[in-house]
Image (cartoon, grey):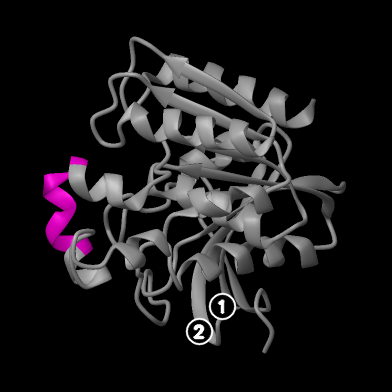
Amino acid sequence: MKNGTIVHSQRYPSPHPQMEVELVTYISDGLKVKGFLVKPKGEGEYPGFLYLRGGIKNVGRVRIGRLIQFASEGFVVFAPCYRGNLGGEGAEDFALADRQDATSGMMVLQQLPYVTDELYAFGFSRGGVMALWVAIEHPGVKKVVTWGGVSDVSLTYWEREDLRRMLKRVVGGSPNKYPERYEARTPLSRLEELAAPVLIIHGYYDVNVSVEHARTLETRLQEVGTPVSSWVYYDLDHYFPPAINRKTVKRLCQWLRE
């Protein structure tokens, strides 16, 4: 079966009376992978919004409430759980083979009859690097948003001592030993292939993903001539307070529609 083919879907409890939630099983590289689909109830067509979570395995799992935030702004939202999670086949490998799960997730949105050809990729934290890869490898993406997003996987290794054991296990070693394996997971050297405008959102005091990721990405996009907007919040870190979070969601959704 082709990537993005939906092989099963089931209704999932929705905390919002105007939103439908489904747990979807779809194909990615021959694997059956899980993802959550959220759509407004009723007739009509909506732009597609691919939500790419952060973390790995049980860290940074997809949160339905977050998806509903974006669906409430007038989008059909699909959030891959990535391979190996929630009963899906395979195992995550941090933005190498598993980035096909994100690209196949965009294909899921494309085949839905109530989704228009306006397709957006959004990534939070580790999802930032996934969103960039989707836009590079899937030319149908109109705009990209990376929020507190990773742009350089080797930088993540050096600045997150608590993640080094995991990265060594997944990648096979450190950036000193296998620089090419970290390069293969990092989209910075291929940004000239990205045609979609990019919005970067970052907290200046972020210690999970340093603002250096945002600065490096912005500089590289400017070098290759890709339109880029950067919103750095100089009094915030990785997680925005609820009120600011809500305002930022509305602001970024407005940016997507412009």
Q: CA distance from mark 2 to mark 1?
A: 5 Å
Q: Which residue carries the number 2 mark?
A: 31
Q: In terms of depth relative to the viewer, which is nearer, 17 or 241?
A: 241
Q: Which residue carries the number 1 mark?
A: 28
Query: What residue appears at the point 28 percent right and 45 percent down from the top-left corner?
Result: 155
The rendered magenta stretch, by its main secondary structure, is classed as helix
Q: Is residue 160 magenta?
A: yes
Query: What residue appears at the point 42 percent right and 47 percent down from the top-left corner?
Result: 63
Quadrant for the N terminus, please.
bottom right
SS label for mark 1: strand
Whether residue 196 can be seen here: yes
Where residue 154 appears, as percent x and y from the top left, is 29, 51
The number of discs equals 2
**For the magenta stretch, what is the residue range?**
159-167
Contact, CB < 8 Å: mark 2 with mark 1? yes
Query: What residue appears at the point 52 percent right and 19 percent down from the top-left corner?
Result: 231
Give the image quarter of residue 143: top right
Q: Is residue 171 magenta?
A: no
Where residue 183 appears, as percent x and y from the top left, is 39, 60
Please state if 41 lies on the left or on the right of 217 as rendered: right
Query: What residue appears at the point 55 percent right and 22 percent down from the top-left corner?
Result: 230
Q: Amino acid at mark 2?
A: Leu
Where residue 124 appears, as percent x and y from the top left, is 45, 41
Whether residue 41 can be seen here: no
